[in-house]
Image (cartoon, rainbow, N blue to C red):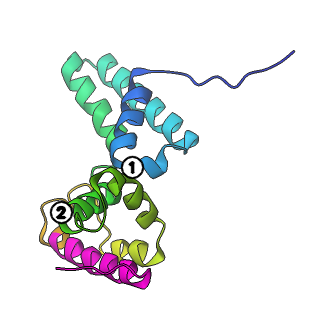
């Protein structure tokens, strides 16, 4: 008998996959992460509802579980830097692909890791510092590839 490995679809799974597509595309292939996180969110909703929380509040609790640790997006930050600072070098159509390639760079990863960005990182002074540092790293990477970057 042939067995097929069918994906289970749930509200939380679809919502997480949609979010990952926009903000963490490098995690879309992590089936275990998606399954575990969406299952945990569904369980959190069920538990909250059983404990007497109103539907909206139970949904809020589940959403917190679903997106915990995912509020800051290195990919999205890189995409914004490319669009804002390098529009004369990288076309808007290529910004998303270029951001994904940059995420694989050791110098980009090391720069981001120095800041240990969490869910409350956006809007912090460190966010602006990271933005500036990443802009410099991208200039260095482009110039190393022979691309002339003009201010």
Which quadrant does the N terminus fall into? top right
Q: Nearer the viewer, mark 1 or mark 2?
A: 2
Left or right of 7 on screen, residue 90 = left
- Looking at the picture, how far across and down is residue 47, in whole percent? 37, 24
* Mark 1 Cα shell of 10 Å, populated few (<14), some (14-19), many (≥20): some
Q: CA distance from mark 1 to mark 2?
A: 19 Å
Mark 1: which secondary structure? loop
- Looking at the picture, how far across and down is residue 7, in whole percent? 59, 25
Mark 2: which secondary structure? helix
Numbered badge on residue 85: none
Residue drawn at the location 47% of the way across and 76% of the way down:
106
Give the quarter of the image for residue 19: top left
Numbered badge on residue 24: 1
Determine if residue 145 is in view: yes
- Looking at the picture, how far across and down is residue 100, in whole percent? 42, 58
Residue drawn at the location 13% of the way across and 66% of the way down:
124
Q: Which residues are magenta?
A: 128-151
Of 55 and 126, which appears nearest the observer? 126
Which quadrant does the C terminus fall into? bottom left
Residue topped by disc 2? 84
Determine if residue 114 is in view: no
Q: Is residue 46 above or below residue 20?
A: above
Left or right of 3 on screen, residue 49 = left
- Looking at the picture, how far across and down is residue 86, in whole percent? 24, 68
In the image, farthest residue toward the right: 1
């Amino acid at each position: 008998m042939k067995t097929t490995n069918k994906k289970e679809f749930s509200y939380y799974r679809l919502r997480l996959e949609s979010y990952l597509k926009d903000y963490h595309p490098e995690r879309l292939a992590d089936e275990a992460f998606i399954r575990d996180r969406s299952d945990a969110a569904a369980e959190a909703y069920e538990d909250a509802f059983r404990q007497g929380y109103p539907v909206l509040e139970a949904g809020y609790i589940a959403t917190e579980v679903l997106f915990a640790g995912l509020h800051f997006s290195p990919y999205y930050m890189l995409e914004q830097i490319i669009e804002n600072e390098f529009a004369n070098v990288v076309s808007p159509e290529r910004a998303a692909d270029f951001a994904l390639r940059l995420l694989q760079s050791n110098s980009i990863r090391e720069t981001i890791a120095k800041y240990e960005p969490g869910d409350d990182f956006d809007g912090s002074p460190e966010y602006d510092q990271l933005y500036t540092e990443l802009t410099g790293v991208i200039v260095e990477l482009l110039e190393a590839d022979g691309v002339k970057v003009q201010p």
